Each structure stands twice: as C-alpha cells, then as structure tokens.
Image (cartoon, rainbow, N blue to C red):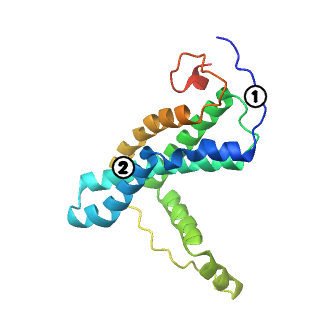
Amino acid sequence: MSELTPVKPTERRGRVERAGFVLQPVFLVSLAGLVANDHVFKQRWPGFLTGKLSDVCGLGLLAMLAWAVLLIARPAWPTTNRQLHRALVTVCVTIAVFFAAMKIWGPAAGGYRTLNSLLADPVVNLRGWLSGDFSLRSAKTTILHDPTDLLAIPILIPIGFYLRRKTALVGEENRSGGDFPSSVTD
C-alpha cells in the first residue's frame, strides 16, 4: 500500500462545503425521524420500538453534527484521507463510549443532565449564578437507564461509511481497498 500524499490545507469555505452532507437525505431523514418519533410516535405508540428509533436517529444525528463541526472548526486539518479516517473513527468511538456510559452509569447520566441544563438555558443559569444561586434551571432531562438502548450503537458503523464517503479529500483516492476503517488496520 502506498502512502497518501498530503494536500495543502484548504480554505474554511472548502471545509464548510465538505460539511454540506448535513443537507443531504441521510441527515434530513434522521432529523425528521427523530422529531416525528419524539413528538408524535412516542405519544401514540409508546414502547420498545419507538424508544430504539429515537436512539438510532439521535446517535446518527450526533455523529453527523459532531463531524461537521470538527470539519468546520479545524480548517487546516486533516490534510490526508488517512488523518480524516482516523479522526472519524475517533469521533464515532467517542460517541459510542459516552452514550453507553450515559445509559448504564448513573454519574455519567448526571453529567449529561448538567451539561444539557447549561446548554438549554445558559442565560437563566448565568443570571442565577451571578446572584449567588448555584442551582441549575431547566434540568428537565430524563435519562432512563436501559441497557437495551445499547442496541442502537451499531448505527455508527454505516454512518461512519457514509461520512467517510462524503468527506474524503478531493484528489486523493483510498488506496487501502476501501474497507472502513482503513486507518485502524494500517
């Protein structure tokens, strides 16, 4: 296998264009599925299937959004497809580990609830903290400890394939045979 040659860092605009997969059908269907499931299906047909559908759609959306943010935030990186694939594997594994921890370990779920409260209403929380009240507001997140939610984690594999295909650097071909993730086997 030959080494991939580095390419010159592209402008931020190029990274934003590469992150344009968020306007593609896979992302939009995941978003529509999550919204419809959480706001309609769970109320009409509560149960195992609607719970897992939320997890699958949510994990897929989180992976795609995290990858888009990474591509936009780091305009000079990655410079090779090998670096890009390693970063993508890292993103997917990190999401899987944190999701699993949140679903089966109480302190991780508490940390998620705290982060969600901070992000959901930062102005109200900051105003309270400045006045000496250090309790969190908007902490309405409920996390059910359900190990069967871990069944949704494998969705990160096809999402990884999709993101790899959509964000490969122009001018470089994957000379490793095309298996995902190539960087892990190198």
Q: Residue at x 74, y 21 (%)?
A: 5
Considering depth in this image, is 134 or 83 the residue closer to the camera?
A: 83
Do the residues under discs 2 and 1 have CB atoms within 8 angstroms? Answer: no
Name which quarter of the figure residue 43 lies in: bottom left
Image quadrant where residue 1 sits:
top right
Q: Secondary structure at mark 2?
A: helix
Disc 2/disc 1 C-alpha distance (Å): 40 Å
Task: Say the numbered circle drawn on residue 182.
Answer: none
Label 1: element kind = loop
**For the residue carrying disc 1, how many other residues have a C-alpha within 10 Å: few (<14), some (14-19), or many (20+)?**
some
Residue 90 in sight in this render: yes
Residue 135 occupies quadrant: bottom right
Percent of width and height locating residue 163? 53, 37
Name the image quarter holding the C terminus. top right
- Residue under the point 66% across and 84% down: 127
Reading the chain from its start, which is encountered first: label 2 or label 1?
1
For label 2, the residue is 149
Give residue 60's position: percent from left, percent from top.
Answer: 45, 46
Type of amino acid at the residue the image marks with label 2: Asp
Q: Tell me if residue 145 can be seen.
A: no
Instruction: State the residue position of label 1.
Output: 7
Residue located 54% across and 39% down the image = 93
Query: In the current view of this chain or complex, which residue is farthest to the bottom?
Result: 131
